[in-house]
Amino acid sequence: MSAFRKTTETFTAGARTLPQRYFIGPEIFAQEQAKVFGRQWMLVGHQSEIAGVGDFLVATVAGESLIVLRDQRLTVRAFYNVCRHRGTRLCEAPTGRLRAIQCPYHAWTYALDGRLTGAPHMDEAPDFEKSDYSLHAVHLVLWEGFIFVNLAASPIPAAEWFAPLASKFAHWNLPQLRSARRMEYDVRANWKLIFQNYSECYHCPGVHPALAKISPYDSAENDLAEGPFLGGFMEISKGASLTMSGKACARPLGEIQGEDQHRVFYYSIFPNMLLSMHPDYVMVHQLWPQSIEQTLVQCDWFFHPQAAEVGAPGYHYDPEDAVAFWDMTNKQDWHVCELSQQGIASRAYRPGPYSPRESIPAAWDREYLRFMSEA
Amino acid sequence: MSAFRKTTETFTAGARTLPQRYFIGPEIFAQEQAKVFGRQWMLVGHQSEIAGVGDFLVATVAGESLIVLRDQRLTVRAFYNVCRHRGTRLCEAPTGRLRAIQCPYHAWTYALDGRLTGAPHMDEAPDFEKSDYSLHAVHLVLWEGFIFVNLAASPIPAAEWFAPLASKFAHWNLPQLRSARRMEYDVRANWKLIFQNYSECYHCPGVHPALAKISPYDSAENDLAEGPFLGGFMEISKGASLTMSGKACARPLGEIQGEDQHRVFYYSIFPNMLLSMHPDYVMVHQLWPQSIEQTLVQCDWFFHPQAAEVGAPGYHYDPEDAVAFWDMTNKQDWHVCELSQQGIASRAYRPGPYSPRESIPAAWDREYLRFMSEA
Amino acid sequence: MSAFRKTTETFTAGARTLPQRYFIGPEIFAQEQAKVFGRQWMLVGHQSEIAGVGDFLVATVAGESLIVLRDQRLTVRAFYNVCRHRGTRLCEAPTGRLRAIQCPYHAWTYALDGRLTGAPHMDEAPDFEKSDYSLHAVHLVLWEGFIFVNLAASPIPAAEWFAPLASKFAHWNLPQLRSARRMEYDVRANWKLIFQNYSECYHCPGVHPALAKISPYDSAENDLAEGPFLGGFMEISKGASLTMSGKACARPLGEIQGEDQHRVFYYSIFPNMLLSMHPDYVMVHQLWPQSIEQTLVQCDWFFHPQAAEVGAPGYHYDPEDAVAFWDMTNKQDWHVCELSQQGIASRAYRPGPYSPRESIPAAWDREYLRFMSEA
């Protein structure tokens, strides 16, 4: 769920939902793998997850297992999780700390920067040069502390891609935050339905009665209404944050002032990030399409790095107060996304009319189609 | 299992079972969806299941979820279970009672006759007319109290389709009956194997020892031996009905007289109904092909509407006496159908010779091929 | 795991692993079904499993269920498990003893040599001749007591196929052995990875620490280094056999003399047999590809036919001592095969350089490609 147009964007009269094939066609999924997930900047985590030398996480992007790690110089790097000898998967654990990357099969060994440093008996092979067999590297960038990778050979430069968001979120102190909790959801719906769901609050009165009570569905104002990044804020009209108790559940994230202390900012970052910034915590969804009709959603709740310390005056640290609120709300959303997936698969489905309260989903669709129309 | 030719039909010398592709080819299944399940009259239930205003059941026909209901005027109607706004599945429950059909996502609301009556905020959309967004309706007819739907745009008229059966079953009082029990079976066999199995009793001595004892496998006489409706009767030579006890398990269904009091009538109604009429109960199978090699079978046992009332002289009402008998017999049949599915998938399978006792399966195959050969 | 080149074979400089499609392409699997599993001699068991008249086992070869049995004259035969009437699967049990083969559906009956001997009511069918409806037979041969079948219409003669191995294994007394134990493994890897894994011990130091301690990875000598049969021996440097205890676990298999008493002989028999001969037991793997990325492995441990008898001086019979050793070692192998399957599926996979210690896998690949290049 999220903000819809109020004042800034123009309602596109006559905009309709996408044709059926975009939600059920395996050929569309294959195109998306090629043109979207395999070519755009994909969120895989936050730098705080791999703070020390050799810390790694394994991410799966467009079906590809990647090792994301800190090398000896603390640089964050990503490699395909594939040995150059016989193709063996190198890292099995989802996270951990490594001194080097050693293949479990024939013990070929790579340094943290990807160079092959050991290959038993290969000195007996004529013309074999270790330098020809470094791990295959993947493009990687840090943006606001979040780790993004890109499988393309020549990606759009990250500075150019993220330019529209430059300094926009400085108040929230994103690079310093730490995740206190992660949940995963297996959603039986196309990933686009989740974006479309996040991008309007027309559904809130019926689907989210608890949320609608404390954050009026018609309080939204969007400042990004076209392009790959979309969203704005909604008011918190009752209570201090979106929590089960209605109270703030941690100290403020940063220098959040004035009216912003009573707002939640919702942005969708194409193609796999949802960024929901509250005064006291940030929720981040990663969307991982598994097939044309199934999506893995990974949800993190980030807090001030010192939130857990005793003695921050006036703030009782209780991350579960936020987690429980959004876990309930997330599940309400996934349920209607799944019902939409089911109905759209019918031969009776025809693209339907977006309401004036659904201008952001319509804008998201336009942007999506722009990527899909690329060569 | 069922009646086979005795006197009325002509044995087709040289008739053989269908080629392998009809049992294992996904392309055949796709053709069947188009030419059979998506174009013919399909049994989905009995009118007694939705007796009152707003009563509904959800049926799945050729992969399509349909809402079948009584509207305000008690007319039985069927609609695709798809919201006209964003395609969301409307009804999740398999049965129930509705005052109106409201979409769980954005609360668009439809009357029981399918008209859109509520669509929040759509009055802000220029050129939007509610009358353009009624639910998509599906053709429906009642025959002998059974509900049939047809997904075709212009189906064969039901009166014409059912004409060969006009008044034929009047003695059994079918429109008034009520189901006392429903069972579902997941059969790992092509749906045609179930029809072929139902259409001969050549297998009865080996497969159904209990049945064969009380209803001789060579007692059959068929009166419908060609066309989409096939069958006839078999004698009950021992006991009053087909039950575990051998006794009648309920009062007679209607005006069943003379020899018919000791007969079971078996008819296959193309393409998804098996109708088995005993003196005291009617068993109805619905066949729902799930894939080329899997079929969901739903089986109902229908009784006189007052069967359960105390005091019908001489008749002890015990539906389980019939249910247990046929549940045992059904499972024996599904098992040999599954063995046939397995063997037919072999490269060694060749169409085999139908025996003179299998003229009805051969006739069924001819009729099936006629439908499949349509444009 | 197995022997690698030491002295006899020539290292092919520049040999690389197979291209990705051979491990993930369903079209390759279909070609393999046609050119390899459906056309070559496939191991299905040992003659000791069906010692008496009517004893049978059911094998599945290239998706085909086969009945392998001893007929009335003790001849071993194989038939497709398919009734000639309506295609029904005949035998459901995996093993057992039969007097005749009777179809469970309509009771057609076949003698143990495949002739149709009973077909109720078919005497009423004009032109029906029982002799036209024998079971479909499959080519079968016994080699060293092992049963091989071949689905081809005109297979390569078995004598020609097995000629390179004539008398080679006479010392081990293979026709007389008996399996004391069978285990099955579901391996999530392409079947070729299992052959490649068996064919080198370059991986042994890292993957099999227990094995490497008692059988040095560099002790191998191969005498078959090209063609469909590959392998040689490795030394047992510590203890009497490959067992958990290090002791022999049964009396010697045959006339094994001199240095061979301290050797294990490893041979791969294209396309589905691995033959591992220890002084006191023989381990045989059957490989059954289920899909391009999944293989069922059946492993038997064979012993001297009188091994279990009390009183063979100096030999304590303890088959589990061998079974436990290889069950541990097998699982270590399957694990790295599965990791290879995962990594090879990556877009980053490129055929990698075989080391000089992997000349047998390279030879196996050449032979495999030769079969795949046949018309």
Image: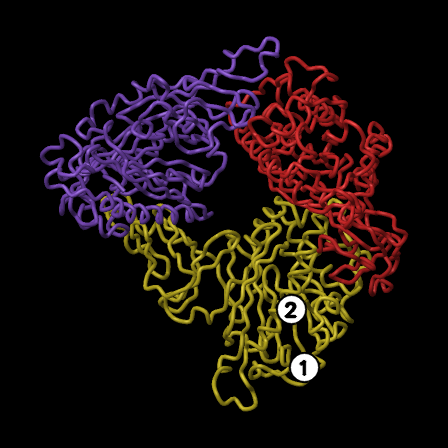
Chain colours: A purple, B yellow, C red
Q: Is residue B311 above or below residue A357?
A: below
Q: Is residue B122 above or below residue C111?
A: above
Q: Earlier in the sequence, mark 1 or mark 2?
A: 1
What residue did someone put label 2 on?
Answer: B329
Residue kind at label 1, given as amino acid type: His
Quarter holding residue B330? bottom right
Q: Nearer the viewer, residue A217 or C58?
A: C58
Dot 2: chain letter: B
Quarter holding residue C248? top right
> Where is residue A186 drawn, in percent x and y?
40, 44
Q: Is residue B66 above or below residue C219?
A: below
Q: Secondary structure at mark 1?
A: helix
Q: CA distance from mark 1 to mark 2?
A: 19 Å
Is label 1 or label 2 in front? 2
**Identity of the residue drawn at 21% across and 36% down:** A265
> Where is residue C178 drawn, in percent x and y?
77, 45
Residue kind at label 2, given as amino acid type: Thr
Residue A332 is left or right of residue A322, and the answer is right
Dot 1: chain letter: B
Is the C terminus of chain C in the top left, top right, bottom left or bottom right quadrant? Answer: top right
Q: Is residue B350 visible?
A: no
> Where is residue B74 drawn, in percent x and y?
39, 69
Q: Nearer the viewer, residue A33 or A95?
A: A95
What residue did someone put label 1 on?
Answer: B262
Is the N terminus of chain C in the top left, top right, bottom left or bottom right quadrant? Answer: top right
Q: Residue furthest top?
A: A127
Q: Secondary structure at mark 2?
A: helix
Residue C87 is left or right of residue B63, and the answer is right
